[in-house]
Amino acid sequence: MKIMHNAPLNDKNWFQTGGCAQHFAQPTTAQEFVQALTFARQEQLSITLLGQGANVLISDQGIVGFVIQPQINHLIIDRAQGLVTAGAGLGMQEVIDAALDQGLHGLEDFSGIPGSIGGCVYINIHYFEYLLSDFLVYAQVINRATGALETVDKSWFGFGYNESALQSGDYYLVEGTFKLSPVSSEQAWYHKGRRDEIVRHRAKRYPLARTCGSFFRNFRDHESLPLIAGKRVPFVAYYLDKIGVKGALQVGGAVVSYQHANMLVTQQGASSNDVIMLARTMQMRVFEAFGVLIEPECQFLGFSDYPLLKPDHVKFARDNFSSTAP
Ligand SMILES: Cc1cc2nc3c(=O)[nH]c(=O)nc-3n(C[C@H](O)[C@H](O)[C@H](O)COP(=O)(O)OP(=O)(O)OC[C@H]3O[C@@H](n4cnc5c(N)ncnc54)[C@H](O)[C@@H]3O)c2cc1C
């Protein structure tokens, strides 16, 4: 496995921004993943995992330490058992397509969502009411500290909306096994049609490049919200639509998409700092209008401090930060 130094990352994430990785490797097997962790331990390097970079913002200063982008791409389909085992580096769409070709359906509601199996399990991808955790049955993970490979079942992940145990950073995904439903070839064609329709629908509604998808997450059940017409509205896009930023608000080369108020898009030459300043402006505007602080779904890599506003920073920011920044 080749270890690169000062490897550019702006071509490895969807925003196409950010600096270099101090050290960078792409293990293609579980054994190479173990070797990568051994190298990091020997050199006392901090470790950052990268999938397809579809849900991350990388610091303009780059990432200190070792960036590992698994390219573990095996795919084992057991149609009789309805089980699909996919390596962490495989794209979700490749897995959906291969499963449907073998007459296994279930994952197609995630069609058109970019990302690797590792990144998708990490955040527990969702589309409307569907969660990836509805399908994962067990997985192989690797222990960051010891490099030991472990097989764990679904309960180990403690899945929730945007939540999984991988977010502790103590373990990384090596492969996931999903339980799908066997269907006849005629039924498989129906599900392929549904897949294609979802992809078409998404292409009309969302930007398809230079974005991380939804930048802010929806509110969780326990979070208190103002009632709007007597109702609790957990959807962050509602608040962002109301403040009128869609297609209108821009900071440097980062702009709020004209297609979706919760999607930030970068233009040629944009920096990650532009995205941060735009996101902070949106946080302040929603706070001023509704008294709630919106929080990111996007993962920040390489930042020494959390770059957005925190609940106890909002008052300070309101007094010191101009929400009418360009
Ligand atoms: C156009 C667009 C549309 C989108 N639509 C949706 C949507 O409808 N629903 C949805 O849920 N998401 C959506 N997203 C977000 C994104 O697709 C998902 O979050 C996806 O899971 C990101 O996968 P990735 O491989 O790119 O992960 P990355 O963005 O590379 O990484 C995300 C996080 O996962 C961690 N990670 C990556 N691999 C591993 C691993 N092997 N083990 C442990 N941790 C790991 C990283 O450290 C990072 O913290 C969209 C994104 C875009 C760009």
Image: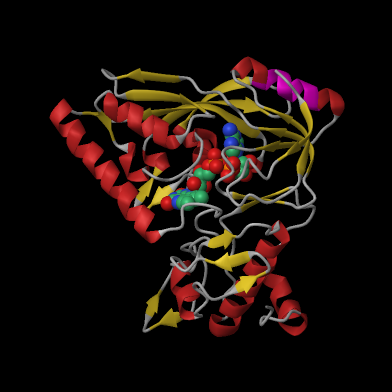
Q: From this viewpoint, is residue 146 visible?
A: no
Q: Which residue lies furthest to the front in this view?
A: 268
**Which residue is at a point 54% across and 29% down the rendered structure image?**
89
Tell me the quarter of the image containing the N terminus. Answer: top right
Residue 309: name its quadrant.
bottom right
Q: Where is residue 298 in the image (x, y as percent from the top left)?
A: 59, 54
284 is higher (above) or lower (below) than 219: below
**39 relative position to 181: left or right:** right
Residue 35: name its quadrant.
top right
Q: Where is residue 58 in the image (x, y as percent from the top left)?
A: 69, 49
**Which residue is at a point 76% across and 53% down the rendered structure image?**
60
Q: Which residue lies furthest to the top in this view?
A: 31
* 162 is within the stretch colored magenta: no
240 is higher (above) or lower (below) than 300: below
Residue 138: name its quadrant.
top left
Q: Residue furthest right?
A: 43
Colour approach in the figure: secondary structure
Range of residues picked out in magenta: 33-40
* 34 is within the stretch colored magenta: yes
Closer-to-camera residue (314/70): 70
Q: What secondary structure is the magenta-colored segment mainly?
A: helix
